[in-house]
Structures are given as C-alpha cells and as structure tokens.
Image (tube, helix red, strand yellow):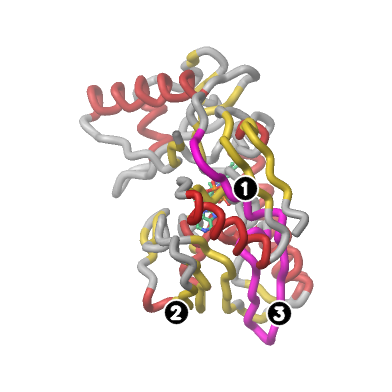
Amino acid sequence: LKLQVLTNEPLSRHTTWRLGGPADLLARPRSREELDYCLSFARRKGLPLHILGNGSNLLVLDGGVRGLVVQTREWRQVIIEGRKIMATAGTLLPGLLQVASKKGLGGLEFAAGIPATVGGAVVMNAGTPAGCLGDRVVGVEVLDYDGRRHILENGEIIFTYRHSSLHRAGTVVTVTLELVPDEVPAIRERIEANLHRRRSRQPLEWPNAGSVFKNPPGYYAGRLIEAVGAKGWRVGGAEVAEKHANFIINRGQATAADVMELIDRVREAVARQLGIDLELEIEVWG
Ligand code: FAD
C-alpha cells in the first residue's frame, strides 16, 4: 500500500470554507484496499473515525479533530450499466454529472453546482426543491465501524430533508443510482441553466459552505435572515453574504470562532424578532 497519511493536517485545506483546525491524522485512500486498511487501522488503535467527503458542508472548529480523518475524494470510479450508474463515494458530483450526461443519462440535473462527493451527497440527501439524491438511489454499500459490509436498498434507507439514516451509520463505499435516459443536449441545457441560476444567486466568489441553516417548514431561512437586517453582518473575517443571506462567506482570515459567533447572532436575532428557531444545515466538527 502507498497510502498517503498526513499528520496534524490543517482541515482548512480540505473544506470549502477554507477554515478549521488540524486533524491528528488525515488518510487519503485511493482504492478499496487502502480504504479497508484505514478503517481497520482506526479500529485496531481505537481511534475516533471521521469520514470527510469534499468538506462542503462542514464547519471544523479551530481546535481541529482528534483521531483519524479519512478523505474519500482521492478514490473516484464510475461504472455505467444501462441506466444504472455505480460510483465510489469519493466521486465528485460535478464529474458524475458530466459522465452521465455524456451517456444520455439525466435525472441528476438538480445537483448541478453542488460541490459534493457522491458519499457526502447521499448521506446528507443533498438536493434542491427540484429533487434530491435519495430519489435516485438504488442501493448503497456501507462498511460499519466493525468492518462489516452491508448493502442497503433504497427502501431500507430513510431519506429526509438534508438528512438520511446513513448519517454516522458507517462509511459509504459505493452508491448505485438509477438515472433517466434523455437527449444529451436537453440534459446539458438543464445543467447549464441550473449552474447559471446558482452563479447569479449565490456568492460563489468567496469560500462558503452553501446554506448555513435549514429552511424551517414554510419559510426560506435566507428571507428570515434578511428580514431581521442581518445581511452584511460581520464578525472578524466572516460575513453574512449580501447576495444570499443564508450564506456566510469567508472574506479572508475568518476563523471557525468568527463563523460560530455570527451564527449565534443571526439565530438569536431571528428567534427574538420572528420567534423562529433556525436549525443548522451545516455540520460542526470538533
Ligand atoms: P462533507 O461536507 O465532507 O461531509 C458531510 C457529512 O457527510 C459528514 O457527516 C461526513 O462525515 C459525511 N460523509 C461524507 N462522505 C461520507 C461517506 N463516504 N460515508 C459516510 N459519511 C460520509 N447542499 C444541498 O443539499 N443542496 C445544495 O444546493 C447545495 N449547494 C451548495 C453550494 C455550495 C457552493 C456549497 C459549498 C455547498 C452546497 N451544499 C448544498 C452543501 C453540500 O455540498 C452538501 O451538504 C453535500 O452533500 C456535502 O458533501 P461533501 O462530500 O462535501 O460532504
């Protein structure tokens, strides 16, 4: 094995927010064998295990995380059979969309512009009002902490809004999706339209982690945050984006503490002025 393992590795290098403290150990498996090795190593040493996809939904605290972080995105593989597509967890969604659309397979266009790995996207049931990953999942291969392999079919997994029963249930190794045959240009057009919509609405020029809060039933979190006047609020290098109030952007030297403080202020204002409790969509590590 030529497994790459980094010690005391700043996770700011591996999250889209570009902030957060170090992992004691960060392993970057490139194959099934290397992934198996990482998981059994954590087990043998009794290390806390954290699975990192593309780090696009994570706020890693400034003290970092203890134990072993396994980053999946170095092992990317896609196999297409008819309308079924099997991808390793570390495959990036944008790449998967490209491969699928080239083959005339649609049904994932809603995910255009979500900078996730397939594993992270299925665990979080990533999506938009137009669809979510869970809608396309046929089966998921999972390794539990004891190294046992489970193949879960869609009906055995609970997918809800930005959550699934896979969360912390083990390591997602591969995901099989069933897509919808369509004309290549039609698929490409929908992808382009979605990318264009995102670019015009989201502050993608700054490091961010997508939506910070979940939309409470019947509301858009961004509108609520705007309504309390929080757009443009700033703590250190963290700022509530003017372009989209549910995004917090890193204007340069933001720390996780800055982001946390800003989150608390926004939450408090929305609760006090509107009587609504905002729930985090992002996940906090550390
Ligand atoms: P990470 O952030 O690395 O991890 C998220 C969680 O998944 C963690 O608990 C992690 O342990 C777990 N995990 C990751 N991989 C595995 C695995 N193989 N096995 C087990 N657990 C695993 N989200 C949406 O839903 N819709 C959007 O439209 C959207 N737009 C976004 C736009 C931008 C610009 C950004 C930065 C983010 C956006 N997001 C969106 C948020 C984010 O992309 C999703 O939540 C995505 O699912 C996270 O995937 P990831 O691979 O980055 O996971």
Give the answer, above or below, for where 269 lies relative to 29. Answer: above
User: What's the residue at 46%, 55% (across, down)?
Assistant: 124
Residue 54: mark in rendering: 1
Residues in magenta, as a range: 65-91
In the shown orientation, is residue 132 left or right of residue 274? right
Would the CB of label 2 be found within 8 Å of ligand 1? no
Q: Is 175 one of the magenta-colored residues?
A: no
Secondary-structure class at tag 2:
strand
Would the CB of label 3 be found within 8 Å of ligand 1? no
Q: Which residue is mark 2?
A: 153
Give the answer, above or below, for where 140 lies relative to 190. Answer: below
- Residue at mark 1 to residue at mark 3: CA–CA distance: 23 Å
Q: Quadrant of residue 281?
A: top left
* Number of the front mark, 1 or 3: 1
Mark 1 residue type:
Asn
Would the CB of label 1 be found within 8 Å of ligand 1? yes
Residue neighbourhood size for the residue with mark 3, other residues' Cα within 10 Å, grouped as few (<14), some (14–19), many (≥20): some
Sequence-wise, which precedes: disc 3 or disc 2?
A: 3
Sequence-wise, which precedes: disc 1 or disc 2?
A: 1
Q: Residue furthest front?
A: 44
In the shown orientation, is residue 266 left or right of residue 64? left
Secondary-structure class at tag 3:
strand
Q: Are marks 1 and 3 in contact (CB under 8 Å)?
A: no
Query: Which image quarter holds the C terminus?
Result: top left
Q: Which residue is mark 3?
A: 80
User: What's the residue at 72%, 68% (across, down)?
Assistant: 77
Give the answer, above or below, for where 64 lies relative to 213. Answer: above
Q: Are marks 3 and 2 in contact (CB under 8 Å)?
A: no
Q: Is residue 194 visible?
A: no
